[in-house]
Amino acid sequence: MSHPEITNRWSLQGTTALVTGGTKGIGYAVVEELAALGACVHTCARSQGQIDACLRQWKERGLKVSGSVCDVSSQADREKLIKEVSSLFGGKLNILINNAGTNVYKPTLEYTAEDFSFMMNTNLQSAFHLSQLAHPLLKASGAGRIVFMSSICSVTSVNIGYPIYSASKGT
Ligand SMILES: NC(=O)c1ccc[n+]([C@@H]2O[C@H](COP(=O)([O-])OP(=O)(O)OC[C@H]3O[C@@H](n4cnc5c(N)ncnc54)[C@H](OP(=O)(O)O)[C@@H]3O)[C@@H](O)[C@H]2O)c1
């Protein structure tokens, strides 16, 4: 039986959120949860087709979610994304979830400089720069929060295929 005080305590009505990488996996679930709690959510990913498919599903469930293409490893895309979010949400953002992330699985000695840049840009630089860009919006909301999606790999050693990923996920 739900208690009204508890329901109210967990309501996100009237708040806004940006979730990067919301078309699959953890990001998809985070978008759904925030929207179900009443937040207006914007998400992004690299595939327009995937975004459209997800937006259709969320619309059918009555959830307030919008989406746009953004490759978070690109500085120009990040700047464009925050401009879109600012315009959508009247210059205010309550929650930034830096979720988009990736890994390239290889034996350590086979990694290239391009692999290193790709993972560091996607996982670490994107989160840092998006947080900088979103700062004025988070401040304007009066109650801004940033979540970084880390990994157990950043605190303990795991099998091969994670050396750069682990560094990019440092807590
Ligand atoms: N799964 C796990 O066990 C686990 C454990 C610890 C931490 N994490 C972290 O949790 C986060 C989500 O993981 P996941 O397993 O849910 O990932 P996933 O299923 O592979 O989904 C990744 C999401 O991010 C998007 N994405 C990937 N690269 C992107 C880019 N450059 N720009 C914009 N969007 C991008 C993907 O869409 P597109 O491909 O269309 O762009 C997709 O929507 C990651 O940061 C990951 O490191 C995951």
Image (cartoon, rainbow, N blue to C red):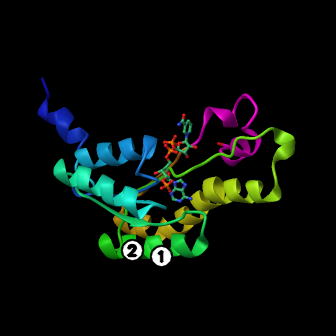
Q: Residue furthest front?
A: 49
Q: Can you see residue 159? A: yes
- Mark 2 sits near ligand 1, with its Cβ under 8 Å away: no
Q: Residue furthest top?
A: 1
Disc ID at residue 162: none
The secondary element bearing badge 2 is classed as: helix
Looking at the rendered structure, the secondary structure element under dot 1 is helix
| Quadrant for the N terminus in the image | top left
Quadrant of the rendered structure where residue 55 is? bottom left
Query: Residue drawn at (25%, 50%), measured in percent from left and top?
Result: 57
Instruction: Please provide percent x and percent y for residue 113.
Output: 82, 58
Mark 1 near ligand 1 (CB under 8 Å)? no
Question: Does residue 154 belong to the magenta stretch?
Answer: yes
Q: How much space separates mark 2 and mark 1, taking CA atoms? A: 6 Å
> What type is the residue that disc 2 sits on?
Glu
The residue lying at 24 percent from left, 39 percent from top is 9
Q: Name the amino acid type tagged 1.
A: Lys
Residue in the image at 22% along x and 50% along y: 38
In the rendered structure, which segment of residues is drawn in magenta? 150-170
* Residue 6, image x, y percentages: 20, 33
The number of callouts visible is 2
Asked which quadrant contains residue 73, the reply is bottom right
- As for residue 61 lying within the magenta part, the answer is no
Label 1 crowd (10 A; few <14 / some 14-19 / many >=20): some
Instruction: From the viewer's side, name the closer residue of 54 and 119.
Output: 54
Q: Quadrant of residue 3?
A: top left
Q: Please tell me which residue lies in front, 117 or 7.
A: 117
**Residue 62 visible in rendering:** no
Q: Is residue 76 left or right of residue 10?
A: right
Q: Which residue is mark 1?
A: 80
- Give the residue pinned by disc 2: 84
Q: Is the Cβ of the residue at disc 2 closer than 8 Å to that at disc 1?
A: yes
